[in-house]
Image (cartoon, helix red, strand yellow):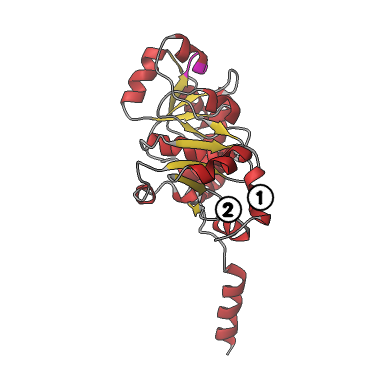
Amino acid sequence: MQAESKAAFIKVVTEGIAAPPQYFPVNARINKEGYDQLEQVLSKGLTALSVAAFKKEKEANCIILDTRHADQFTQGFVPGSIFIGLEGRFAEWAGSLLSFSTPIILVTEAGKEKETIIRLARVGLDKINGYLEGGFEQWQQSGEPIDMIIDVEADELMMDIPHDPNLVVMDVRRETEFADGHLKDAINLPLTEMTDPGTMANIEETQNLYVHCAGGYRSVIAVSMLKRQGIHNLRNVVGDGVKSRSRSGPRL
């Protein structure tokens, strides 16, 4: 009986708790062993890359990580970039979504390079090959191709829904948030699950995806990852208007 009570207790206190992020074991090791290699990481990461050098790294299949504010990123970015802005839960999302084995090159706001590298290193992301000298502005001024994300307000989404038969609302919040209230017929693809290529398999080319979260930070991350997979029929729903409507609106 005692064993059964213990098992029941464990089930109660752990039910609904998500699996620990992939960076947890790495973070635990760093906390135990210290940051002995931080100076090396900074030395390499703080290498200023010209546009030409940045392109070579890009062609070598490095991850392009853009840490500017979401509002800046949506207006223009280096094609193939993943957005994770410093203004949000940066280290947590970087450690959850990025590969620890693939080198990273950075696009940051001026003066934010060192902060970005240190915060990445704290979750074990230490393969940083440098940053784009002059930032995105230099890339743009050099005449290189750019990509951008179309932002829409919640009211625009609600107006588009009845008129676009191919419109699909993608909610990238956690399952518990989705269960608390969501737009009718929305599909739930939590951001944490978007590292699995299989999750993209059910997205059809004819679909027009309107991606939203609770405030507009996670949705921009999601859209950048979708674009990196070659999916471009996308809209980013800004703000928390969808969240407020979902509480009073219809559910699935």
The answer, for residue 24, to whether it is visible in the render is: yes
**In this rendering, position of residue 156 left or right of residue 98:** right
Visible residue check, residue 34: no
Of 61 and 120, nearer the camera is 61
Residue type (three-letter) at the residue carrying disc 2: Leu
Left or right side of 121 for 206: left
Instruction: Say how many tags the image has.
Output: 2
Position of residue 37 measured from the top left corner of the image (x, y, whole percent):
49, 33
x and y, in percent, of residue 233 in the image: 42, 36
Q: Which residue is mark 1?
A: 245
Query: As drawn, is 122 to the left or to the right of 82?
Result: right
Left or right: 152 with respect to 200?
right
Q: CA distance from mark 2 to mark 1?
A: 7 Å
Instruction: Name the outermost residue toward the front.
Output: 163
Magenta part of the chain: 132-136
Q: Earlier in the sequence, mark 2 or mark 1?
A: 2
Q: Which residue is mark 2?
A: 183
Callout 1, which amino acid? Arg
Q: Is residue 152 shown above or below 179? A: above
Q: In the image, what residue occupies the spot 43% across and 20% down?
A: 146
Asked if marks 2 and 1 touch (Cβ < 8 Å), the reply is yes
Whether residue 111 is in magenta: the answer is: no
